[in-house]
Amino acid sequence: MNILIANDDGPEAEGLGALRSAARTAYPGAVIVTISSKVPSGGQGLSVTPKPLDDFTVEKVACQFYISDAKPADLMYLGLGQPERFLKEGCFDLVLTGINHGENIGMDVFHSGTVGMAMLASTFFGTPAVAFSQQGNEKTMDGRQLKDRSDFIVRFLRSEPKSAAKCWNVNYPATDPVGWKICSVANHSRFRPFQAENRMHEGCDVIGLERGFIVLSPLDLNVGPPVSRSSYTTVDALHWACEFDRVRLVRFGEIGQANQFP
């Protein structure tokens, strides 16, 4: 199995280190390649640099660890579009992004480089992807706090979440989580909260995170003809959640049901 890890907070970000460690634990036999922008590049969304991929500088700074003068979305085009630059053979089977220093919920999923990379990987390249973010910012981020998330990340990855959705957005609360829940994406922007009507509801990611839950949102960036909304977002994700929590035999009725940690 080949795994591509990327972030938009720079190669020295503690969140990136925590995610790499969790991935090694979850997939001990996998080839794990990391690529990061040379400097923090948050808020880039799906924007790209208008130049050929071969013109990007890609520098190897450690074993299977690369940095580039590219934007976050460029990193996906480099890694998934030219896997031969990073792998001896084959292509990448899974993309993990983050752990972002700051939550990515509501409409901000469209601004986020962390989430943008995951959506690009799953939509354009058809590669399953998970974006991880931690509520807070680089000034309030606690390295110990990030490392404490590893157990959940490992459990989540081992549960085969790609069987339920091609793309997941996972956000951790600033406090110790009270549980986890599958949430829809709210019509709310923390950066531009007053420029449009904010439609938040029970079961959305903004409210879930505010209440101290780890919120999991299956994302579908559909660029084809309209599809039925009874897709995996509400059906397969709930079935996966039953299996993910089968130790306690939790049954799901709808998106937004809370799952308490024991």
Image (tube, grey):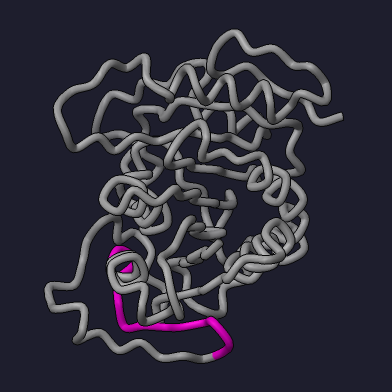
Horizontal side, residue 195 vs residue 22: left or right = left
Total numbered badges shown on the rendered structure: 0
**Percent x, y of residue 22:** 69, 60
Question: Between 161 and 57, which is closer to the camera in this rendering?
Answer: 161
Name the quadrant of the N terminus.
Answer: bottom right
Question: Between 86 and 208, which is closer to the camera in this rendering?
Answer: 86
**Percent x, y of residue 102:** 52, 54
Whether residue 66 is in magenta: the answer is yes
Whether residue 201 is in magenta: the answer is no
Q: Residue visible at 56% across and 65% down?
A: 138
Name the quadrant of the C terminus.
Answer: top right
Q: Considering only vertical position in the picture, is 9 above or below 54? A: above
Q: Which residues are magenta?
A: 62-73
Q: Residue visible at 37% across and 44% down?
A: 109
Question: Between 94 and 117, which is closer to the camera in this rendering?
Answer: 94
Residue 81 is drawn in which quadrant?
bottom left
The outermost residue toward the front is 89
Q: Considering only vertical position in the picture, is 81 above or below 204? A: below
**Percent x, y of residue 41:** 36, 70
Horizontal side, residue 217 vs residue 188: left or right = right
Horizontal side, residue 226 vs residue 242: left or right = left
Q: Considering only vertical position in the picture, is 206 above or below 176? A: above
Question: Between 72 and 234, which is closer to the camera in this rendering?
Answer: 234
Q: Residue visible at 46% across and 46% down?
A: 104
Q: Residue visible at 60% across and 33% down?
A: 210
**Percent x, y of residue 66:** 46, 83
The outermost residue toward the top is 253
Residue 173 is drawn in which quadrant?
top right
